[in-house]
Image (cartoon, rainbow, N blue to C red):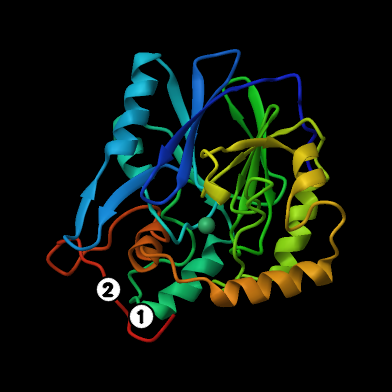
Amino acid sequence: MPATVDLSTIPTVTGFFDESSNTISYIVQDPDSAACAIIDPVMEFDQASGRLTHDSADQMIAFIQEKNLQLEWVIETHVHADHLSGAPYIQEHLGGKIGIGKHVQTVQDTFGKIFNEGTEFQRDGSQFDALFEDGDTYQVGAMSCFALHTPGHTPACMVHVMGNAGFAGDTLFMPDGGSARADFPGGDAGQLYDSIQRVLSLPDDLRLFMCHDYGPGGRAIAWETTVAEQKENNIHVGGGKTREDFIKFRTERDAQLAVPKLILPSLQVNMRGGEVPADKDGNMMLKTPVNKL
Ligand SMILES: [Fe+2]
């Protein structure tokens, strides 16, 4: 394990639920200073009209301003395929560094080809302020944090641990939701199983915060659990399910899942660190590659 989990540092974690994509974004406050981080902020996009809005990001900005917090980091757990990132909009208002896993370069390479991007689209991750490698540590105020590389859902997925709080990204869902799909380009069910095992090897009492929740069976939306609860109860990997069982189940299940509504705009924007691509005259413009996904 690259860094030790510090269960004695207890950040205040506030979740913001985006109903249109079932995404939870977080503000994480260092208990010993005014420093904070944002995880996975959302920008709303109405595909029919091509209109972008910032309601969720505005709520997060207002929260930080009201409490006089200092935003140090905006962290993307991965290149999301179901919603557009609000990271640049938040950075414009509050500063902070935008960070993602270094393997975003693999994602940029894959989707650079699918969207037939020209040479002006850099595939080196330089759109982000920081690229995390497995085990990298960083600070939010006085709070020590680290990133774990957890590929499988996507190649660039990372779980971030801040004090006694872990941000699972799309490695795990709540115990009754199981796990995220592993069938996007660059995804791999076996890798996802191995990554989940890494998360489950963290201390039992680590709080785990999900990136998505769909309220299975009609239960209320929830986003916080623990490593111990996941080990015992996760319907896809809990109770000692084998790697083979998981790969078979995950592959069959993924074959039946519809493509996320916003996958094409999401990838084009999120692989650019949340910036919308522009045409030669500087107009924000998105592509629809046909029969490529
Ligand atoms: Fe995802």
Residue that badge 2 annotates: 287
- Of the two numbered discs 2 and 1 in the rendering, the one whose residue sits closer to the viewer: 2
- Can you say whether 117 is above or below 271 in the image? below
Labels 2 and 1 touching (C-beta < 8 A): yes
What is the three-letter code of the residue carrying label 2?
Answer: Lys
Q: Amino acid at mark 1?
A: Asn
Observer-nearest residue: 83 or 124?
A: 83
Q: Furthest residue to the bottom?
A: 291
Q: For this view, does 185 lie left or right of residue 251?
A: left
Above/below status of 275 relative to 225: below
Q: Residue at x 62, y 49 (%)?
A: 173
- Badge 1 is on which residue? 116
Circle 1 SS class: loop
179 over 139 or under it: above or below = below
Question: Is residue 191 in sight in this rendering?
Answer: yes
From this view, report whether residue 238 is shown above or below residue 27.
below
Horizontal relation, residue 120 to residue 29: left or right:
left
Left or right of 117 on screen, residue 214: right
Q: Residue furthest left?
A: 281
- Mark 1, Cα crowd under 10 Å, few <14 / some 14-19 / many 20+, is few
Identity of the residue drawn at 29% across and 76% down: 288
